[in-house]
Amino acid sequence: MSEKYYRVRTAAKLIDLEFSSRTLYSWIAKIEKRTTYRFLRKDILRNGIPVSQILLTEEDILLLKKLYRLRNGERKELTAAIFATFLSPEELAERLMIEENIL
């Protein structure tokens, strides 16, 4: 069976009905900037013009739901929530150690 892919607008509503796709786009950009995690991008033609579109898997949506819960439910700072969700335990420990040693 093939894997399902979701557009950002659809995924935002699956995460929470009140969650805006604009905020989700912002989070995706921050996740890719601060971690090595990458989301699938597909170029499609819209009126003859190539447009890059982000497609999310069900696994991506589960991780983004966790991030949403940490950010909005537990009120964690966004960067800390991104690290807790998208970094491996080893990467997280290394990142925290580096931040503790900054004077």
Image (cartoon, rainbow, N blue to C red):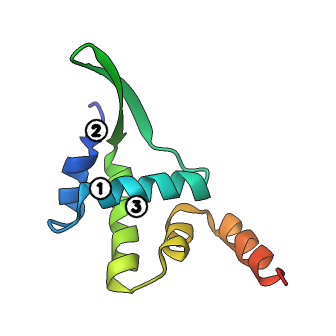
**As rendered, which of 70 and 27 lies closer to the eye?**
27
| Mark sitting on residue 63 | 3
Establish if 55 lies above or below 65: above
Quadrant in the rendering for residue 39: top left
- In the rendered structure, are the residues bearing label 3 and label 1 in contact, judged by CB atoms less than 8 Å apart? no
> Would residue 99 appear left or right of 22 to someone viewing this image?
right
> Identity of the amino acid at label 2?
Tyr
Q: Amino acid at mark 3?
A: Leu
* Label ID, residue 5: 2
**Mark 1 vs 2: CB contact within 8 A:** no
Task: Indicate the position of residue 61 as horizontal and vertical percent values.
Answer: 32, 55
- In the image, what residue occupies the spot 19% across and 49% down? 10
Q: Are marks 2 and 3 in contact (CB under 8 Å)?
A: no
Q: First in sequence: mark 2 or mark 3?
A: 2
Instruction: Please give the name of the residue rendered at 55% of the width and 76% of the height, measured from the top-left corner.
Output: 80
**Residue that badge 1 annotates:** 22
Front residue (pair 84, 99): 99
Q: Tag 2's secondary structure?
A: loop
Q: Gap in Å between the C-alphas at discs 2 and 3?
A: 14 Å
User: Mark 1 vs mark 2: which is more N-terminal?
Assistant: 2
